[in-house]
Amino acid sequence: MTPRGRFLLATTTSLVLAGLVHIGVVLLIPRLAEADSLSRARVGETLDHAMPVYTLATGDTASPPEAWLPIPDPAVAVGICAYDLADGPMRVSARTGPLMLSLAVHGRRGAFYAVTDQAAVRGGLDLVVLTRAQYDEALANADENDVTRDVRIVAPDAKGYVVVRVIAALPSQRPAANAAVQAVSCTVDLPVEDKAGG
């Protein structure tokens, strides 16, 4: 092989190797990051309501500077319900009102389900996030005469979070949007026999 051929081979090999290392590092960043969205959301895992992430400014109260979502919309109040399905399925319940509300379920690899208040039944929206095994158990134990209004979602990961967003189209609606986020209930969905016993 000529010196020029060896030089081209070495250069090409170096560029390919550098590209592979770069791609590998970029793909590992979410797994190695300590302050990713899932880690931050897990702080509120023990709460029974949505943890406020971005509260809208109302009158003299400014929006909190600690909001960690990228460039939050100034007209959208945001909250998060974190879950760990090892504790049992998570039930997210929201009452709908005049303001638009949306729920988006996220796992380690991003959002995998979203719904708005347009899907509400009789003013209520109930999501139950489950593992595949929990879903199969719920189907096996279901009473075919008992109609459920729950939306059951099988999660790809045991840990994740639900993002609650409420839009305030007018400044006068901001307090109501903040309150609507706080009113969302996030609880471990116990089996019927456990509820009766406790």
Image: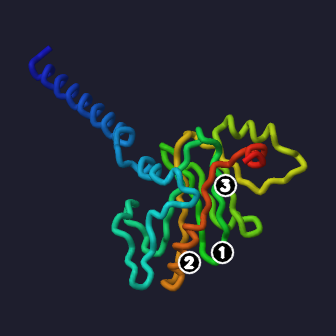
Q: Name the residue carrying label 1.
A: 97
Task: Tell me which numbered mark, 2 or 1, is placed earlier along the sequence.
Answer: 1
Name the residue rendered at 47%, 49% in the picture. Answer: 42
How crowded is the residue under tag 3: few (<14 C-alpha within 10 Å), some, or many (20+)?
Answer: many
Task: Tell me which numbered mark, 3 or 2, is placed earlier along the sequence.
Answer: 3
Q: Name the residue carrying label 2.
A: 176
Q: Is residue 144 left or right of residue 137?
A: right
Distance from Cα at disc 2 to Cα at disc 1: 10 Å
Task: Tell me which numbered mark, 1 or 3, is placed earlier along the sequence.
Answer: 1
How crowded is the residue under tag 1: few (<14 C-alpha within 10 Å), some, or many (20+)?
Answer: few
In terms of image quadrants, where is residue 137? top right
In percent of width and height, residue 121 lies at 75, 65
In percent of width and height, residue 198 lies at 72, 48
In front: mark 3 or mark 2? 2
Q: Is residue 134 left or right of residue 30?
A: right
User: What is the image's colouring?
Assistant: rainbow
